[in-house]
Image (spheres, helix red, strand yellow):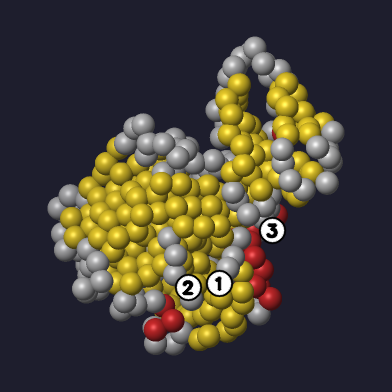
Amino acid sequence: MNLFYKSTFRIILPFLFLIFSLGNTKAQTYCIQSGSEQIAGEEDGFRYELWNQNSQGTACMTLGNEALFSGEWDGILNYLARRGLGYNQTQEHQEIGNFFTTYNCNYNPSTSSGNSYLSIYGWTIDPLVEYYIIEDWRNWIPSMADGAVLKKSFEINGSVYDIYENTRVNQPSIVGNTTFQQYFSIRRDTRNSGTIDISEHFKQWESIDMNLGKLHEVSFVVEGYQSSGSFEFNELDIFIDNTTLGINDIDNPNSYFEIYPNPATDEAYIKFKKTNTTKKLKIYDTSGKMVLSKNYDNTESIAKISNLTKGVYFVSLNINNQKVVDKLIIY
């Protein structure tokens, strides 16, 4: 059996770089009530969606700080909870940047019946494609579906992924019932935490003519079919190499801070160009690991960065509800 519900809910989020808080100081819970199948919207600038086919059993989703979320399901036919970022279907992924994610999810589906999986999920149009990067699963995965074709295997992020393609005929999609392709990367060594080079999966698919179109969505999803379980994301970062857009503005990082020298050897400095507000600085290495997180008050104008090993880093600044990022090279 498979999970084939597809949302027609759309929301455009004008940003490319997201930092999801690790804490959870606020929470809002949604549950599907009888007579309804879907709850969808936007909170803290991030889209969310909860779906429960035929409003059967118990299906809930809790929104935490920024994009953190959790959920539970029991006695359902088909459950879906996802949260992430959406696009306006005008750009292909390579026009936006290189996508990465770092995550940690307490994923607890039942194994006695039904199935479930944890994955990166999304759609493109022109061509219409539904895609998954499956990290963990129980009892059933799309490679078992009738018609699924193994196209390639490749190694990345510490494991081998098997690439499958399938065709869905006259099935629900983001544009209504139609025929479309499904792309899957399925991790052989299942896990529920780590880093995913999302763009590398896109490139691997396209190298074998599994072409993607204009991007509609990049989300993390938990799905369940005739099963029960729960999950909670304790960490969830999605970021894009050397590209920054704010939640409210599209801007250049140089409008907010300057890194010098860059490239640097032993230490670098960050000059804040907006000094009348508090600032949160985070630095990530290319694997997605956060190596520094520090807050600066409205009087501080310069930050000193040291003790970084040789390599490339992404420097993120959160200021006035804007999230901007630039690249730092240590050699």
Provide residue 11's location: percent of width, then percent of height: 47, 46
Q: Which residue is mark 3?
A: 94
Q: Residues within 10 Å of mark 2 (few under 14, many from 20)?
A: few
Q: Is residue 54 visible?
A: no
Q: How far apart are labels 3 and 1 at the CA level?
A: 24 Å
Q: Earlier in the sequence, mark 3 or mark 1?
A: 3
Q: Earlier in the sequence, mark 2 or mark 1?
A: 1
Say left or right for 244 vs 311.
left
How far apart are the two marked residues, 2 and 3, measured between alpha carbons? 28 Å
Residue 19's disc number: none
Toward the viewer: 173 or 33? 33
Q: Position of residue 287 (x, y in %)?
A: 63, 54
At x 59% / y 44%, what residue is drawn? Answer: 290
Q: Are marks 2 and 1 in contact (CB under 8 Å)?
A: yes
Q: Is residue 162 above or below residue 128?
A: below
- Where residue 72 appears, as percent x and y from the top left, is 25, 54
Percent position (x, y) of residue 265?
84, 40
Task: Identify the residue position indicated by label 1 in the image.
Answer: 159
Disc 2/disc 1 C-alpha distance (Å)? 6 Å
